[in-house]
Image (spheres, grey):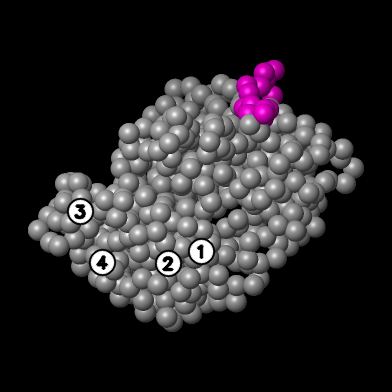
Amino acid sequence: MKKVKSITDRDFAVGKTNPRLFGIFLEPIGDIIYGSLYNPNHPAADENGFRKDVMELIRELHTTLIRTPGGNYVSAYHWKDGIGPKEKRPTRKNMAWFHIDSNAMGIDEYALYNRLLGTEFMIAANLGTGTPEEAAEEVEYCNLPSGTYWSDLRRSNGWEEPHNLKLWCLGNEMDGKWQVGAKNPEEYARTCEETAKMMKWIDPSIELVACGSCSNDLGLTTYGEWDRILLERAYEYIDYLSVHRYYSYDKNVHMFFPNPYGVEDIPGLHLDLKSYLDTITAAADFIKGKNRFDKDIYLSLDEWGAQTSYDVRIPGEDWSEKPEGSEGWFKNPPNLLDALIHGMFLITILNRCDRIKIACESVAIGGMIAVDPEGGAYRHTTFYPFSQAALYGNGEVLQPALSGDTVETPSFGNVLPVQTATVYNEEESTITVFALNLDLRSDVEFDTDFRSFGKVSLIEQIELYDDQPLMGNTFENPERITPHIVSNAENKVILKKHSWNVLRYKVEK
């Protein structure tokens, strides 16, 4: 059995977690919105057409923020199509995902959905086929109380009080050739600057998220340079840079660029993510220093997740065959390995909370919640790391020193199999350690040292594990992989191979 030790000191703090770190992303792809979120004909629909069973699962995620409609979809979406009487709204072809959009869900409905859930609405403006004027009018419609054309139109549409939306994305992945209205760095910088100016002239209190390099994939030739050019022009008008990242352990699965990583690389994926975040942060800090700006630009990791696959095997392991009907990205039920990738993202986000202030798992319906448009819904394996991080991850993140045995990876060399994030909640006198064992073959004895806290005792260990890591939950067996409490003899912690763990400690005063 391998051994890893963690030393955590009270004085080595990263920063306090922002509630916005526990956001989700929803986009009109397939039946994610129409059928799963909004389905007036479903038995579980409320008076607004929202499925109550799905809303309850979103509440159970403890999410704080929803980014929508967002995504590739928004670059050809005109918000004025989605206001007013539904029977008069135009039906459009969704050019991003090639299906028909009825516009039954618009800004007002999304605002209501967030209000019912008690979550913040992170909205995206169209900077693909849209104009700066259109974005400014959108702010006027949503945020001004009354007395102007667009604010009065909102009131006449039945929404007397302003939606008061404070967090706005300036487009989506505008550096990607797949994007409707994609731009080169100079074009986007100019559009971003002018749009930001006009939106803040309408409402100076809003916060703006500009598109940073949307990936660090080798095929994205403007990576890094895009951010420098953008910030040279728009630094003073924006507050965040948007970054997106997805990972898969199957080289046959990719989005717009080839995937270089295999299943044996899972323990080192966090190093690639770290390099990406470091590069974008460095670009922002370079422009800040060069131009003597006072404010920092923070990161919004507002799309992150795992690309699911079942067509790989670890050599020497006799794992079960893929479940029935697992074709397609959103039809594949995420398995345990996908849950571990989610855990890797969450741990990285917490450990970088000094610069990452917003994060959204993508896409929550499909990615964490399985929904049958004509039936029920259940929790994917990926649901549990997110809900636990959102529940227990509020407080001050401490930077531990990890040491111990390593595991070899093809792309990253020898790395520690264990990754952790440690959150201290002073008010509750608790320490929570989120711990991944990404060794696919070996359990790890995990030793924690909280030397500056005095007496610390283990309350519980919550474990997400299955001996068949390529399996997931299904409609036929929705609770095959769920968290359970581990019995710890003498506070000894064993992290099983390919497992996610939540370790809860009590600090004695």
Q: Quadrant of residue 205?
A: bottom left
Please state if 321 lies on the left or on the right of 466 as rendered. Answer: right
User: Is the C-beta separation of discs 4 and 1 under 8 Å?
Assistant: no
Kind of residue sitting beneath label 2 = Ala
| Residue shown at 43% from the left, 82% from the top | 186
Residue ID for mark 2:
76
User: Tag 1: residue type?
Assistant: Ala
* Marks 4 and 2, how far apart at CA: 17 Å
Residue 180 in picture, x, y percent from top left? 48, 71
- Give the left or right position of residue 433, taking residue 133 as reference: right
Q: Nearer the viewer, mark 4 or mark 2?
A: 2
Q: CA distance from mark 3 to mark 4?
A: 15 Å
Question: From which residue to which does the magenta span run?
Answer: 476-492
Of labels 4 and 1, earlier in sequence is 1
For disc 1, the marked residue is 96
Assign a secondary structure to mark 4: helix
Residue 136, disc: 4
Single out the mark in the foreground, 3 or 4.
3
Q: Are marks 2 and 1 in contact (CB under 8 Å)?
A: yes
Q: Amino acid at mark 4?
A: Ala
Give the mark nearer the N terminus: 4 vs 2.
Answer: 2
Q: Residues within 10 Å of mark 2 (few under 14, many from 20)?
A: some
Image quadrant holding the C terminus, namely top left
Q: CA distance from mark 2 to mark 3?
A: 22 Å
**Can you tell which mark lies on residue 154?**
3
Determine the image quadrant of residue 493.
top right
Q: Is residue 260 magenta?
A: no
Who comes first in sequence, dot 2 or dot 3?
A: 2
